[in-house]
Image (cartoon, coloured by chain):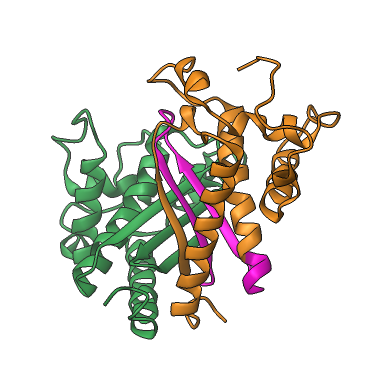
Chain colours: A orange, B green
Amino acid sequence: MTESVLLIATDDPILTSDFMIELERQVRALDAYGSYDAWSAAKVLDPYILTKERKREIPLVGDPDDVTISRVKAFYNAIASLIEKECGQMAVPLVSLTHEGFGRALITVGKLVVMEKTLRDVHRFGFPSASKLKDEADKLLAVALEIIGAHPKAAGM
Amino acid sequence: MTESVLLIATDDPILTSDFMIELERQVRALDAYGSYDAWSAAKVLDPYILTKERKREIPLVGDPDDVTISRVKAFYNAIASLIEKECGQMAVPLVSLTHEGFGRALITVGKLVVMEKTLRDVHRFGFPSASKLKDEADKLLAVALEIIGAHPKAAGM
């Protein structure tokens, strides 16, 4: 994963989408030591892209390291943040993992679970391309807003 | 905490309450090596009782050990199990903790968060007496059922 070829072009228009801007912000927010300060958005977000070739380099079974766990948390933090912007209510993400990289990710708004995902093989968390990453986020956002629309009272709207 | 005097009498009628029976069951369920197999219910549940004297023996700041974390999980598992029995829908507990013993406990029914608690100082998790332990559980159960009653559709009822 230390290869120097980025799989997101620094001028890729996808980097100007709401989700990718938020995701970059969330990754930087969890970067307590400022290691990414001099990095471009493309370089910060590049590890989210796991092509077949990159996946092949990661063992099938393994424990996720702190950087990978941060990446998973930043992903759900970014989705929570977009949900919050859309519905105007606080959206709280919660990622609970075992050491072996299994667990659950939840986002709640008021008393409503607006997103829920079972996580497995977190050490291999990633998406085939930047557009697939954004698609997944857009889908989770749309479903969350639909759930809020169906249960506005439980969401505290 | 290795004192031999139990703070719950082996014939305390509280041990026959639904919650205490369920709590004992949940503690034993997390006891993967069967260390408690020969123990009475009173002995299994005794570590939940933290009197002032017992609390004084635990440092103010500390990381919770695995046994303590299991105890916290068993407590919320037991509450989830009672919620499930009352409402007939699956109740899923989720305890998410940092190494330092801070975190959140959630119980969800369908898309509804029926219990939510911020956890701190988990290494000092306990109750002044068995009846206080049961009172807290009864309270959380009552509130959860109230939330389900207010939002039955989100709970999937």
Quadrant for residue B69, please give it.
top left
Quadrant for residue B20, please give it.
bottom left
Using residue B41 as the reference point, say whether residue B71 is left or right of it: right
Report the quarter where the N terminus of chain B lies: top left
Q: Residue at 19% of width from left, 66% of height from top?
A: B17
Q: Nearer the viewer, residue B32 or B112?
A: B112
Q: Nearer the viewer, residue B130 or A128?
A: A128
Q: Is residue A62 above or below residue A96?
A: above
Question: In the rendering, at what x and y percent does residue B58 appear?
Answer: 53, 39
Q: Residue at 36% of width from left, 41% of height from top?
A: B70
Q: Nearer the viewer, residue A53 or A156?
A: A53
Q: Is residue B62 visible?
A: no
Using residue A8 as the reference point, say whether residue B20 is left or right of it: left
Specify whether residue A85 is painted magenta. Answer: yes
Quadrant for residue A37, please give it.
top right
Q: Residue at 79% of width from left, 30% of height from top?
A: A36
Using residue A134 as the reference point, say whether residue A10 is left or right of it: right
Q: Residue at 50% of width from left, 74% of height from top?
A: A148
Q: Which residues are magenta?
A: A84-111
Question: In the rendering, at what x and y percent does residue B123 appear?
Answer: 50, 42
Question: In the rendering, at what x and y percent does residue A134 appear?
Answer: 59, 48
Report the quarter where the C terminus of chain B lies: bottom left
Q: Is residue B36 visible?
A: yes
Residue pushed farthest right? A38
Specify whether residue A24 is painted magenta. Answer: no
Using residue A132 as the reference point, say whether residue A150 is left or right of it: left
